[in-house]
Amino acid sequence: MAGGPSVLGIVLAGGEGKRLMPLTADRAKPAVPFGGAYRLIDFVLSNMVNGGINRICVLTQYKSHSLDRHVSQTWRMTSIRGDYVTPVPAQQRLGPRWYLGSADAIYQSLNLVYDEQPDYIVVFGADHVYRMDPQQMLQRHIESGAGVTVAGIKVPRSQASEFGVITTGPDGRSVAGFLEKPADPPGLPGDPDRVFASMGNYIFTTKVLLDALQQDAEDETSVHDMGGSILPMLTATGQAEVYDFDDNKVPGETARDHGYWRDVGTLDAYYDAHMDLISVQPVFNLYNRHWPIFSHPPQRPPAKVVAGGMVAESMVSAGCIVSGQVTGSVLGPGVVVEAGAVVQESVLMDGVRVGRGAVVRKAILDKNVVVPPGAVIGVDPVRDRELYTISAGGVVALGKGRQVR
């Protein structure tokens, strides 16, 4: 921001996303399509840009071609002020090795920091669905004088085993400890039934981060991870504070979608986050014009519903042609649902074609999957389990271009 502190944004986008297979068989997790018109990485980049952070490096590694291409083609900032969003693949600057962890990814990319010389560094993950104004978190960080501020979201204590958990001191702000997916963590002061789950979003004072990364790089026993290594190190020296995500107020939000954040790291979480989009009053509202989620929509004609087709409680992207029945679903660009076909409670990505009389129920179909006429998916769990991937919650998932039997 003009006249304010200089800030560099770093997005950690090298995740392999094994739990999202088969959706990550051919792409990095942050490149997975979401909500018909977006990629997962669009959410964090939209939050940064809407929040005035306009110099952003996206660190990539695993199967990054589609991610690099999306960032390069979509996120073109004005060059007049020197703003940029740039993908930075692993470059082996410190020797013939790939990133050993998220902290090592930044350590191997410190040339970006030295070139920019920021006062503060905003380090966010790339694969969560949410709205957040990072400027509010930055101001809190500056006011506190902390070396690092980590964003935390309050979740029921019973769900703690799914997250990295931040324990706080008596003041409720200083970080006392960091527990990785604990079975029985202590509750929050004054709120014993809830804990702070780490959102994977950090803001550092630059010198503090540089010193911590150097110390971590020299520790041969370290896992070189931001949450598992750097945060505990700074916690031990009393330099870490937590930022309560509930304090973040995003323009245009409603009471219903305030504080929405989803880690879509599993098929069930990914599926559930899509179902959050489609109600009349959605749990997560993509239609907030005051804090838009940006992307690069394909150049396709408007969607159309023809030949007695029917669409209800669904989102339908550009280029779709629906002649069958679609309910409770999200259709990506160019999806075709032929006459007599039924699609229920499903997520269909770009170019999926559902043939005449076919049935698709509670399924995720990746790009260009063709469902032959009369085929059935999501109806016979025993048969589906023999042929396809089925999540713990019973969602059938087919990877990109997968043949349907």
Image (cartoon, helix red, strand yellow):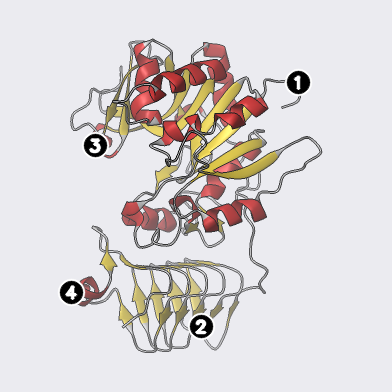
Residue contact at pointers 4 and 2, CB within 8 angstroms:
no
Q: Give the amino acid type for the residue marked by disc 4 in the picture.
A: Val
Crowd band around label 1 with a 10 angstrom C-alpha radius: few (<14), some (14–19), many (20+):
few
Single out the residue that lies furthest toward the front.
96
Q: Nearer the viewer, mark 2 or mark 3?
A: 3
Q: Give the amino acid type for the residue marked by disc 3 in the picture.
A: Ser
Front position in the image: 6 or 134: 6
Sequence order check, earlier mark of 3 and 4: 3
Sequence order check, earlier mark of 4 and 1: 1
Q: Give the amino acid type for the residue marked by disc 2 in the picture.
A: Gly
Residue under label 2, please give it. 309
Residue under label 1, please give it. 3
Crowd band around label 3 with a 10 angstrom C-alpha radius: few (<14), some (14–19), many (20+):
some
Rounded to the nearest angstrom, the CA distance separating label 3 from label 4 is 30 Å
**Horizontal and vertical percent position of residue 311:** 50, 74
Residue 161 badge: 3
Q: Nearer the viewer, mark 4 or mark 2?
A: 4
